[in-house]
Image (cartoon, helix red, strand yellow):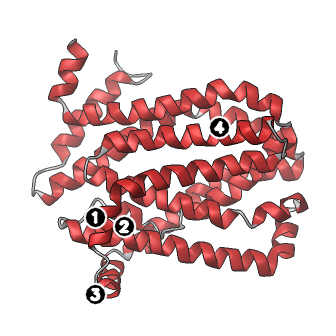
Amino acid sequence: MYIKSWLQKNEFAANVAKLITGTALGQVITVLISPILTRLYSAEDFGILAIYLSVAGILSVVISFRFEEAVVLPSEENEAIDLVILGIGISLIFSIVLLFIFYSSSKKILDLIDHPELKFYLYLIPLSTFFYGCNQVLSYWMSRIKFFNPLAVSKTVKESSTVLTQLSLGGLIYTGAFGLIAGQIIGNAAAAGFLFWRSVTKIRSRLIPGLLSNLKNVFLKYKQFPLFTGWVALINSISQNIPALLLAAFFSPAIAGYFAIATRILTIPSILIGNSVRQVYYQKASALKNQGQPIFEFYKSHAHVLSLTTPGGTS
């Protein structure tokens, strides 16, 4: 009862709890199904998935030029919606460009990563990056308008769609690594589709004759995101995704597969808490700034609470 009462009084904590609940449910599904998936698919299959996700992950982080992070910043809602449309549009264009590059230079790329078995899967990467980009942009829009319940549901939709696809393709008709990769694509597509369905009315309202001019204006106004934060995010993504590529190159895809499975389980706490807190805090801090209120006191009070509730804290 005390926790329920505290959450009702503390909007920040309540919103974090909503996201943690949705993320936790999705992660529980993943953990429970993992032993079954390791029986349906070989270590080599997981290794190919790890290589695929590493390449897709590096590209996905800049697929929308980081404009998704700008969505929560404008004081005007119409400007934020224009950023949503811009982010989705750039994700689509970038993904088409990637498909053309992979089609025209597939041999050079496969020689570079030294995994010819990825030849077919290479053409699926643009699809993964597009749905991931849409998911990210729409997630920040949901965060901006404080639709944290739908955002939490989207996380469960993503994980459940992923594992259901992987179980179906692995159990009914064994398709090798394709089943694992298809599950990832469909999971992101399902989450993006759900968030788009919840946002389509607002997006449609901005599809007006002056749309291109509006998109140009917000692009120029928030150009610091691709110019500065984009490079930081790209370098960080490379550092996170390069181990699987190196393990596959120096040892075998099977070793990379074991590494990927272990890493996915070990990173659940950071995904569960860190991402949820970050997303809610970013929205709240942006709202305070737009209202002309100080942010530091809000940061200090919540940083203190988090320090008390994390391992190594004072309690």
Is residue 30 in view from this perspective? yes
Q: Which residue is mark 2?
A: 84
Q: Residue at x 30, y 78 (%)?
A: 221
Q: Amino acid at mark 2?
A: Val
Label 4 crowd (10 A; few <14 / some 14-19 / many >=20): some
Q: Which residue is mark 4?
A: 164
Q: Amino acid at mark 4?
A: Leu
Left or right of residue 272, residue 36 in this image: right
Image mark for residue 202 = 1
> Is 91 drawn above or below residue 267 in the view shown?
below
In the rendered image, residue 136, in percent from the top left (x then y), is placed at 46, 56
Q: Residue at x 29, y 87 (%)?
A: 209
**C-alpha distance separating marks 2 and 3:** 16 Å
Instruction: Say which of 224 and 27 sits in front.
Output: 27
**C-alpha distance separating marks 1 and 2:** 10 Å
**C-alpha distance separating marks 4 and 2:** 29 Å
Task: Report the number of discs.
Answer: 4
Q: Which residue is mark 3?
A: 210
> Is 281 drawn above or below residue 82 in the view shown?
above
Dot 4 or dot 1: first in sequence order is: 4
- Res 151 → quadrant: top left
Left or right of residue 305, residue 235 in this image: right
Circles 1, 2 touching at the beta carbon (< 8 Å):
yes
